[in-house]
Image (cartoon, coloured by chain):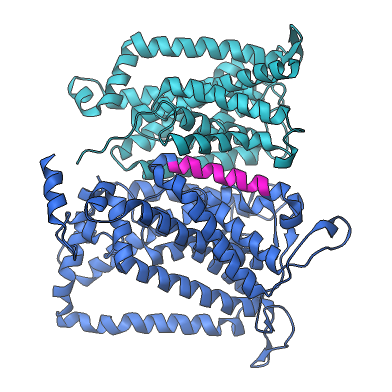
Amino acid sequence: MNQFLSLLLNGISLGAIYALIALGFVIIFKASEVVSFTHGSLLLLGAYSIARLSDSIGFLPAVLVGLLVTALAALLVERLIINRLRGAPVISLAIVTIGVDIILLTELIRRIGPDILNVPHPWGGDSVRIGGVGISENRLIAMGVAGVLIVAFFVAFKYSSWGVAMRASAEDGEAAALMGIRQGRVSALAWIVAGVLAGVAALFLVGAPTPGVSAAAYTVALRAFPAAILGGLDSTGGALVGGLLIGITEAMAAGYQEQLSFLGRGFGEVAPYVVMIIVLLVRPSGLFGTKELTRV
Amino acid sequence: MSDTLSVPAGATRRTTPAEASVPGRSPLRFLKPLLLVAFLVVLLVLPIYVEEFWLRTGFAVAGAIVGAIGLNLLVGTTGQLSLAHAFFLAVGAVSYTFISGESGGLGTRAALRGLELPPIVGMVVGVLLAGLAGLLFSPIAARLRGIYLGVASLGLVFIGVHVLNTWTPVTGGFNGRSVPEFSLFGFTFGNSDPQLFVLGIPFREAERLWYLGIVLALLAYLFARNLLRSRPGRALQTLRDSEVAASVMGVNVQAYKARVFLVSSMYAGLSGVMYALSIGSIAPESFGLTVSILYLAMIVLGGLGSVAGAALGAAFVTALPLVFQQFADVLPLVSAPGEGGVSAGIAARYLFGLAIVLVVLFEPGGLAGFAQRFRSRGRRPGRGSPGASPRPSGGPSPGPDPGTTGPGSTGPGTTDPHPTDPPVRRSSAT
């Protein structure tokens, strides 16, 4: 029972990080109809900047600069490429983000090389016990920060003028434009927010129990794709649920490895994709995604 | 969106018959097959003149061409974004290795199993099994639209790599296993058995595989080209432009999606077998997400929907890193492995990424679209041709092949041999 609770808690904390990434994913999709395959390398970019800068300028400034870098990179992608392709089919937009991803990822992996860069989190790699259930401090803080950010996001999404503008554009871009909502600005802001969320996720993703920033962080970030898809690509609430679901699945599959040995070692890394495919079989647009209606 | 964009291409096609009667064009008509024959002859005699490196690269390119043509049928022609291509490659490669490979081995390899059947059986069954895998995935694929399919297929790649890593007796596990030589009715595609000399030049593994590659790539090319020009091919293109229009016109959407998955993954299976033969061993990392993305790069660069474009893109993407590596000491900015600086593989990847972005931004038709533009401009000097008119950078769908965007774009019911009037009328009423 203790093991179960511990895995559940760890799964939820991992899921909170995934939810941050998935949320960025969903906002981008809602604002500019793009499925951003660049997200994995954006995250790696954030983690890399934080790790490289924290030696020279200290941890907190490094984090701020790291977030700025990811936000700026996301904004650049939007302004230089996506903005020019408005109205293009979803597939070409996805492909163009894959192109950006190749460039960015190649450069980052070349810079990181085989090393594992250490991020000097002030909270270190210790773990705490809460009623017999162990969890790393990093993950605990991640859970708190993610929770605050997610709540803040939902409040802003619901009440701020940016949120209203964004929801209006997602609902009907043309009508929103006619009401004086600047589509370009909405989309640019969405990319910035997504970039910041990815940066925050990166900060915690490379902390304990993960050893540090390596090329493998990219693969971890990719698991936010199933999270976003699972919840439904156009549902912010879905991203949250999807993230948690994927996090818990992964933690459980890794934790009960012995019992699942017939599935092979390291099944935890694949379990999210298995769950995603199963969910998609039953609900083709994810758990909370709006069904696509076709009008002739 | 794609409908409006592809109209110019359709218009070009309709003006072509009229042009055929223009006397000035007749020499061109003979020129094209002549060039093709000359190209083939050059390919056939090349092993006598060039080094082994080029022949090995050639076989790798041939394998990639087969795979890219298959992926292009799925993504370019039918509009189903798939990142699972590496998975189907793996199914083909592993099946071939398992069926034709030997059991046992030395040390840790002792656990390996193989059926030791003739390699041709391995190849055929590998292709069939890859097709079966595609068919099994197609019920999922058929339910998913566009981008959902893209990400779901991404999952397949990770699951595939996991299976490759863990199913050691068949796949060789983490370290992979070596691939048996190909042979056909006693003639091996290895270094000996039988010894073969042509004009005094020894024909060894590289030379033999070169010819195998040409034959297989040519067959794959012809099959795909004919498929696209046939009724099913037209149906697939209509499916891409509008699923609703396709179903209204009597195309069974689910069945066609399943079939195109079957064909595409069979192509991938053959490509996987060829890849295994060209490398000589299989390992999990050869079938990761990177491979899927490279295949996507091939067809985007070549031009979505165009068979020849896919072949061109495959040649470019496959050969570039190898050529970079070969000439690392001559090229600026590229250095040999271990010397610091930018290695060949990395330099090539920068180029692919950049090329993808530029192609989508400025020339959605890819290399094939570029060639098409060039040709239609040369054909009619003095007059701005519709194909050459600058169009907004839009989707991949504006078919570079004049035949690819015919019926779907010119409006439902106008060019279909079996007009289905009542459904069309009903659709316009709603």
Please provide percent x and percent y for residue A260.
Answer: 72, 35
Q: Residue furthest right?
A: B107
Residue depicted at x 63% and y 61%:
B93
Report the side of B336 relative to B382 (left or right): right
Q: Quadrant of residue B282?
A: bottom right
- Specify the principal SS of the magenta part: helix
Which chain does blue denote in the image? B
Please provide percent x and percent y for residue B19.
Answer: 16, 74
Nearer to me, B108 or B399? B108
The part of the chain drawn in magenta is B149-163
Q: Quadrant of residue B78?
A: bottom left
Residue depicted at x 50% and y 51%:
B352
Nearer to me, A287 or B306? A287
Q: Say whether residue B153 is magenta.
A: yes
Report the side of B179 relative to B217 (left or right): right
Please provide percent x and percent y for residue A3.
Answer: 74, 19
